Image (cartoon, rainbow, N blue to C red):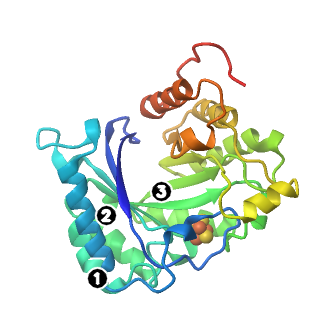
C-alpha cells in the first residue's frame, strides 16, 4: 500500500499531476508468465470496506504530505486536474479483489478527480465495468495488458485471452467513451532479444491504430521466478536500457494522436550497471513529458 505522484502528458498535450494509489487486495486469478504482481497481494478475498478505506487513507496522506512539484493546489485546479490511478496488483473488476459492495463508496471517492484509471483483464469487462462507465463517462480510463502484438509469442504468455478479445474489449471501451491505456512489454519472454525493439514498436503501432490514448512501454524484469527459469533456458532476456530508449524513440516517430511513454519505475535498480544511468533516466523523463525525442548528449550509450 502506498502512493506515487508524477507528472504525465495527456492526449491533449497538457502535462498534469497524476497520483497512483497502490491498493492491496486478493491475488489475480490469471497466471501470466511474466507477472510478479502476486507479491503485492493477500491470500484471502479482499474484505468489504477495505478498498474504500485504503483509498481514503492514501488520498489523505498523498494530499496532506504531498508529492513535490506535481502536488496540486487550489491555484492549479486541485483534484479536478489530477489523474487518479487505482492499481490493485490485480484486476479492478474482479469481485475477489475489489468487492462490488464497495462500488458506491469508490465512485464517491474518485468523483472529484479529472480522470480515474483502473486495470482490468479484457474478460472482466462486464456489467460492473458498464456501471463505472455510466457513472464516470469519459473520466474513466481502463488499462489493459497488450504485452505484445507478436502472433505466436502472445499465446505463450498465458494471458488467458487473445488479440481478438483485446480488440473487442478496446472497441467496447471506446464506444462507451472510456479511455484506453495499453501496456507493452519491450522484451517479452519467448522473443529473441534482437527482435525485441522491432516488436515493441509494432505492438505500440497495433495499439495506436485501434484507438489507445496511451501506450506505456514496460521493461520486462525478472523477479517472479518463472522468468529466471526461462532466462536460464535461453527463452528470456531482460530489457536493456538501450532497448527501452530505442523502442520509445521509434514509437514516437510513428506519429499519431496517442501518447507513448516509457515506464521508468525501478529503472535505477534494474539498470544499475548501465553507463550514465542518471542522465539517461532524466532524458527519458523529459521525453515522456514532452512527447518528442530529446537528442542524446554524448552519442548512443551501449
Ligand atoms: S492479468 Fe494482470 S495481474 Fe493478472 S497475472 Fe496477468 S498481468 Fe498479472
**Residue 69 in sight in this render:** yes
The residue tagged 3 is 180
**Is residue 20 shown to the viewer in this render?**
no
CB of mark 2 within 8 Å of CB of mark 3? Answer: no
Q: Are marks 2 and 1 in contact (CB under 8 Å)?
A: no
In the rendered view, would you say 261 is above or below 141? above
Secondary structure state at the residue bearing disc 1: loop
Q: Dot 2: what SS? A: helix
Q: Dot 2, crowdedness within 10 Å: few (<14), some or many (≥20)?
A: some
User: With respect to residue 124, does 82 lie above or below?
Assistant: above
Ligand 1 location (quadrant): bottom right
Which of discs 2 and 1 lies nearer the camera? The answer is 1
Residue 97 position within the rendered picture, expressed as x and y whole percent measured from the top left: 45, 79
Quadrant housing the N terminus: bottom left
Instruction: Check disc 3 and report its element: helix, strand or loop.
Output: strand
Cα–Cα gap, marks 1 and 3: 28 Å
Picture residue at 53% right of the left edge, 63% below the top? 171
User: Residue 137 has which mark?
Assistant: 2
Q: Tell which circle, 2 or 3, labels the residue nearer the N-terminal end.
A: 2
Whether label 3 lies within 8 Å of ligand 1 gets the answer no
Amino acid at each position: 500500500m502506498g502512493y506515487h505522484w508524477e507528472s504525465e502528458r495527456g492526449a491533449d498535450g497538457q502535462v498534469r499531476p497524476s497520483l497512483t494509489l497502490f491498493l492491496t487486495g486478493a491475488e489475480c486469478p490469471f497466471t501470466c508468465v511474466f507477472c510478479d504482481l502476486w507479491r503485492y497481494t493477500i491470500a484471502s478475498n479482499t474484505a468489504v470496506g477495505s478498498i474504500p478505506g485504503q483509498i481514503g487513507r492514501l488520498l489523505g496522506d498523498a494530499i496532506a504530505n504531498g508529492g513535490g512539484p506535481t502536488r496540486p493546489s487550489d491555484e492549479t485546479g486541485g483534484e479536478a486536474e489530477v489523474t487518479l490511478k487505482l492499481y490493485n496488483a490485480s484486476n479492478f473488476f474482479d469481485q475477489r479483489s475489489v468487492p462490488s459492495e464497495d462500488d458506491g463508496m469508490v465512485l464517491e471517492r474518485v468523483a472529484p478527480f479529472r480522470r480515474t484509471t483502473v486495470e482490468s483483464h479484457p474478460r472482466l469487462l462486464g456489467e460492473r465495468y458498464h456501471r463505472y462507465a455510466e457513472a464516470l463517462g469519459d473520466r474513466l480510463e481502463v488499462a489493459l495488458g497488450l504485452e505484445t502484438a507478436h502472433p505466436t509469442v502472445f499465446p505463450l504468455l498465458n494471458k488467458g485471452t487473445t488479440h481478438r478479445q483485446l480488440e473487442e474489449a478496446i472497441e467496447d471501451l471506446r464506444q462507451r467513451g472510456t479511455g484506453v491505456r495499453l501496456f507493452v512489454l519491450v522484451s517479452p519472454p519467448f522473443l529473441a532479444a534482437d527482435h525485441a525493439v522491432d516488436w515493441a514498436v509494432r505492438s505500440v503501432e497495433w495499439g495506436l491504430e485501434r484507438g489507445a490514448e496511451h501506450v506505456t512501454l514496460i521493461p520486462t524484469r525478472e523477479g517472479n521466478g518463472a522468468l529466471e527459469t526461462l532466462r536460464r533456458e535461453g527463452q528470456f532476456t531482460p530489457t536493456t536500457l538501450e532497448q527501452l530508449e530505442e523502442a520509445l524513440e521509434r514509437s514516437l516517430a510513428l506519429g499519431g494522436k496517442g501518447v507513448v511513454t516509457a515506464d521508468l519505475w525501478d529503472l535505477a535498480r534494474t539498470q544499475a550497471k548501465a553507463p550514465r544511468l542518471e542522465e539517461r533516466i532524466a532524458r527519458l523523463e523529459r521525453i515522456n513529458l514532452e512527447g518528442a525525442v530529446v537528442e542524446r548528449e554524448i552519442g548512443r550509450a551501449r
